[in-house]
Image: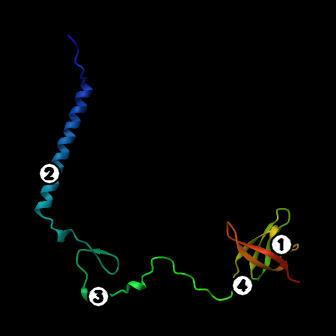
Amino acid sequence: MAKSQETWNKKEIEKKRQKNKKDKEQKKIERRSAVKEGSSFEDMIAYVDEYGQITSTPPDPLKKVKINHEDIEISVPKQESLGQVDVVRTGIVTFFNDSKGYGFIKDQETQESIFVHANGLEGPIKENNKVTFEVERGQKGLNAVRVKVVR
């Protein structure tokens, strides 16, 4: 006589699977009966007040603010041109390393630090020199080009 192919472990796994299936069906029936009993559509609605808080009371129609749809900006507004911007700037060399060939210039007008490379120089510069330069946008930010020492 051959031994049964069902082991004790397989029987236990099948029992658990059947129990989970029954539990799931029971929960499904409970959810359906709960929906029919008490909750109406009006009970499920939530409102947002003028301060952004979620409430159960509808907003007061007297406090309603009319918004013109043309005033809503979805993207970044275009910059208005400020006219002719001064292309040549002046600044002071705060740091320059001759061996590595780069440094920084502090713009006198905006007080921002701008990177300068030896390729952008029109003559030798040193720290604390007053210089004139033009600015170009590089891969990592602003770069000073056509740098000249002011005498």
Decide if residue 95 is on the left or right side of residue 142: right
Disc 4 versus disc 3: distance between alpha carbons?
Answer: 48 Å
Disc 1 versus disc 4: distance between alpha carbons?
Answer: 20 Å
Identify residue for label 2.
Answer: 29
Q: Position of residue 9 (x, y in %)?
A: 27, 27
Q: Residue furthest left?
A: 37
| Circle 3: element type | helix
Residue type, label 2: Ile
Which is more toward the observer, 103 or 94?
103
Give the mark, 1 or 4, whose residue is nearer the N terminus: 4
To which quarter of the image does residue 135 belong? bottom right
How many numbered marks appear?
Answer: 4
Task: Specify few, some or many for label 4: CA neighbours under 10 Å numbering under 14, 14-19, or 20 or more.
Answer: few
| Circle 1: element type | loop
Identify residue for label 1.
Answer: 121
Give the mark, 1 or 3, whose residue is nearer the N terminus: 3
Q: Position of residue 150 (x, y in %)?
A: 86, 82
- Residue 129 visible in the current orientation: no
Decide if residue 57 is on the left or right side of residue 94: left
Relative height, residue 87 to residue 126 (above, below): below
Residue 109 is tagged as 4
Q: Dots 1 and 4: beta carbons under 8 Å?
A: no
To which quarter of the image does residue 74 belong? bottom left
Task: Specify few, some or many for label 2: CA neighbours under 10 Å numbering under 14, 14-19, or 20 or more.
Answer: few
Q: Dots 3 and 2: beta carbons under 8 Å?
A: no
- The residue at 19%/37% (across/down) is 18
Which is more toward the observer, 146 or 100?
146
Disc 4 versus disc 2: distance between alpha carbons?
Answer: 74 Å
Q: Position of residue 37 (x, y in %)?
A: 10, 61
Disc 3 versus disc 2: distance between alpha carbons?
Answer: 44 Å
Disc 1 versus disc 3: distance between alpha carbons?
Answer: 63 Å
Residue type, label 3: Lys
